[in-house]
Image: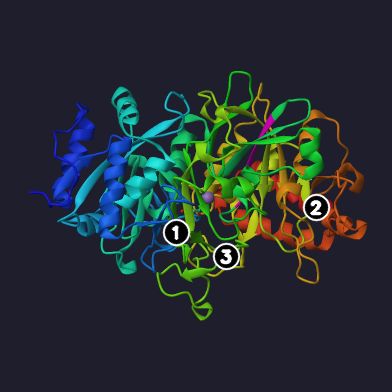
Amino acid sequence: MRASHFPFPSHAMPTQLAALKQWVESVAGLTQPQAIHWCDGSDAENAKLIDLMLATGDLIKLNEKTHPNCYLHRSSPSDVARVEHLTFVCTSKEVDAGPNNHWMSPADAHAKMDALYAGCMRGRTMYVVPYCMGPIDSPLARCGVEITDSPYVVANMRIMTRMGAPALARIEREANFVRGLHSIGDLNPDRRFIMHFPEELAIQSFGSGYGGNALLGKKCHALRIASYQARNEGWLAEHMLIVGIENPKGETHYVAAAFPSACGKTNLAMLIPPEGYRRDGWKVWTVGDDICWMRPGSDGRLYAINPEAGYFGVAPGTSAKTNPNALAMLNKDAIFTNVGVTADNQPWWEGLPEGVPVKDWQGRDYDKANGPAAHPNSRFTVSAVNCPSYTAHAEDAQGVPLSAIVFGGRRESLVPLVFEARDWTHGVLVGAAMASETTAAATGAVGVVRRDSMAMKPFAGYNFGDYFNHWLSFDKPGAKLPKVFHVNWFRKGSDGKFLWPGFGDNLRVLEWMLKRVGGDAGAVETPIGHIPKADDLNTAGLDLPAAVLDQLLAVDRAGWQAEMQAIGEYFAGYGERTPAPLAAEQQRIAASLS
Ligand code: SAT
Ligand code: MN
C-alpha cells in the first residue's frame, strides 16, 4: 500500500548484508512505515525528493535566477536548535558517560524510545540512508546508516555526507556501521530525545528535525559516537575546523581549530587574507569547517580528515564583508532553513547589507516588532565543493598533516588574543580549560560563560576525565605533535567594542603561530604560555593603537589566578578520572602566578 504521491516504486532490499537487513526489518516492524525507500544518492532520486517536498510545503523554491536550485525550509518554531537537556549518552555504567553528559541506562532509554517509535511512521515513508563520514576510500573514514521518516533529513544528509550506493558498498565490505534511527515524530518538544548508545554504536533520535538533532551523521555520529570509537582505536574525533595556510613560498601548513558553535569557525575556515597578504601571495584553503578526525601517521605527525562533505553554517552575519567565500557558495544548490525572504523570493538574513525582508523565518509578514527576519540560528546547507576556497586535499585518503592545533573561545575579558602552550600536556590543559560565552546554536541562555573543554562539552560521547587522558596519551616516543595555541578574537574594551578586527586579520595571528612552528618568531614566556611581543605580530596596515595591542597581549595575573582556581575546581568535578598530569599542570601554573 503506497500513497499516490509517493514517487518511489517499492523494491527488495538492495543488500545482502544480513545485519543491515535484519535491523531495517526490525525498525520497519516497530515503526510501521507505509513504504520503505533505500537511498542511492543519485541526482534523479534527489530531484524526486525535492519535488515531493515542494508539493508538501516542506520546501519553498527560492528565486531561480539569483539562486538556482536553492530552497527554503521553515521548521516548527519550537524546533530551531540542539536540545542538550534532552540529549543522553547511554552507557551501561553512569560514570563512563561522565558529569559532562546526561546519562540514562540503556534499558530505560530503549524502553522510552521503543514506546515513542511504536507505529510512528504509519502513513509515512521510511528512508534508509547509507552514508560514509570521510573520503570514501579513506582508512580514517567510518560509515553509518540513518533510517529517517524526514525527506528534509535525506536531502541534507546527501549534502553533508557521502551518501548512497558507494557508502553501501563500503558498509557491505566492512560489515560494521553506526545504526542511526530518526523520526520527526510529532515535533512535540515534550516527546523529543536524542539518545546515544556508544557501546552499541547506535543513535536514536525522536521529535526534532533540526540539524544537530536529526542529521545523525554530524554531531551524533561524527562526534559523540566517533569520539568513543576513536578512544578505543587510538584516534581523535574533534569539533574542529581544518584550514590550509599557503605562504608566499608556496608552502601549505594545516591548522585544526576548536571553537564552540557560532564562534566564527566557518569564517576562519574560509578566511580571505587581508589586502597586503593577498598581494604577497598568501592563500587560505578550506578542508572543513566543523569536524576533524585525526590520527598519528607513520611519521609521527597527526593527520586529519574532514568527515563531512558539506557545510551546515549559521546564516545571520554571513556577508561579503565577513565571509565572501561563504556568500559566494550560497548562490546555488543550497538549502536554507529558517531565514527570511525578500519580495523577489531571495533568502535574507540579518547582516546582509542589501535586500529587504518581506517574510520572516516563520513565514509571517516581516515586522520588526516580532524580532529578526531570520532566526538567530538559521542555517544553510551546501556542498563543500561549492566553496571557492575548498581544496582537493580535503579528499586525500590519508588526510592532511597538522602543524598546529588552536583552541578558542568567546571571552569579553581576561583571555589574551593569542598564547602558545609550552608542550603537549600544557596544550591539553589549555584545551580542557576552554570556556566561552554561550550562543544561539543551543537552546538556553545566551552570553553566559561556560567551560567547554575542546568545544566538546555537548559532543564527547564519554567521561571528560577519560577523554583528557586519551588526549594526553598521544604524547609518546616518536610523536611529532602539532604545537597548541589558544586564541580569543572577542576581547572587548570598556566601550563594549571589540578590540581586535577579527575576520581576515586573524591571518596575522595564524602567521605568528606558523612562524613559531618553524622556529622563527619571538614570544615572551609567561605563566599562562608564550605570548607574542607587540612587534612579533604583523600589524602593518591595521588601525590598532599600541595601547590596544598591549591590552590584547597582556596577562592580568590576578584575573588568571582566579581563572586557574576555577579551572582546578572544574577538573576536580571529574574526580578520580581527572588525569594526574593535568591536575599537576594546573597546580604548577597556579603556583607560578602567585
Ligand atoms: O549542532 S549543529 O550541527 O546543528 C550546529 C552546531 O551547533 O554546530
Ligand atoms: Mn559545530
Q: Give the side of residue 307 with respect to residue 419, left or right.
A: left
Q: Position of residue 30 (x, y in %)?
A: 16, 50
Residue furthest to the bottom in view is 369
Q: Is mark 3 within 8 Å of ligand 1?
A: no
- Return the residue at label 3: 350
Which dot marks residue 488? Answer: none
Mark 1 / mark 3, whichever is N-terminal: 1
Q: Which is more toward the observer, 593 or 171?
A: 171
Type of amino acid at the residue the image marks with label 2 = Ala
Residue under numbered circle 1: 82
Quadrant position of residue 48? top left
Classed neighbour count for the residue bearing mark 2: other residues with Cα under 10 Å, few (<14), some (14–19), many (≥20): few
Q: Identify the residue shown where x is 35% and y is 53%.
A: 195
Q: Which residues are magenta?
A: 253-259
Q: Which residue in the protein does label 2 denote?
A: 591
Vertical comparison of 80 with 586: above or below: below
Which is in the foreground here, disc 3 or disc 2?
3
Of the residues tagged 1 and 3, which is closer to the observer?
3
Q: Earlier in the sequence, mark 2 or mark 1?
A: 1
Q: Quick one: SS at disc 2?
A: helix
Residue 524, quarter of the rendered image: top right
Residue 175 in view here: no
- Asked if the residue at label 1 sits under 8 Å from ligand 1, the reply is yes
Majority secondary structure in the magenta region = strand
**Distance between mark 2 and mark 1 Cα atoms:** 39 Å
Residue depicted at x 70% and y 45%: 584
Q: Secondary structure at mark 3?
A: loop
Location of residue 208 (image quadrant): bottom left
Q: Earlier in the sequence, mark 3 or mark 2?
A: 3
Percent of width and height locating residue 153 = 34, 49
